[in-house]
Image (spheres, rainbow, N blue to C red):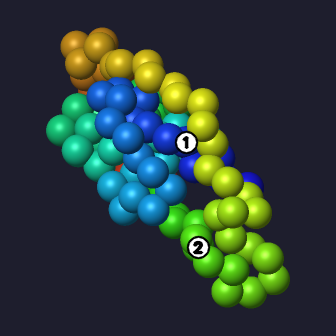
Amino acid sequence: MLELRPCCEHCGIDLPPESTEARICSYECTFCADCVDAVLDNVCPNCGGGFVPRPVRPARDWKGGNHLAKDPAGAVRKHRPVDPAQHAEFAAPIRGISPEGR
């Protein structure tokens, strides 16, 4: 089950469970859409993968007890700002490869 991490790892902006601005990689590294586009160029600084919009967990129990109150979002903040110059060097050889081809 996704942790639904509470903030962007780079800029620290809050990304509550209902946020449509949260982006995650396959390891659930979590960044805001602005940082993914403007800083990371859709290359995860931790694994080199790409990002997708993070799903929103339903707040209401629509079916089967699957909802936010039963499975709350994570509360541990992972704020690990990316050094833009180091990331640019890391991402340079792979940014032109589509995430599914990396």
* Residue ID at (18%, 38%): 38
Front-lying residue, 79 or 38: 79
Q: Is residue 1 above or below residue 13?
A: below
Front-lying residue, 1 or 85: 1
| Amino acid type at mark 1 | Arg
- Sequence-wise first label, 2 or 1: 1
* Residue ID at (22%, 13%): 85
Q: Position of residue 101 (x, y in %)?
A: 47, 50
Question: Which SS class for mark 1?
Answer: loop
Res. 90 image quadrant: top left
Q: Quadrant of the N terminus?
A: bottom right
Q: Is residue 39 above or below residue 33?
A: above
Q: Which mark is residue 5?
A: 1
In the rendered view, does 78 fall on the left or right side of 21?
Answer: right
Q: Position of residue 20 (x, y in %)?
A: 37, 62
Question: Which SS class for mark 2?
Answer: loop
Task: State the residue position of label 2.
Answer: 58
In the rendered view, does 19 fall on the left or right side of 67?
Answer: left
Name the residue at the bottom extreme.
Answer: 63
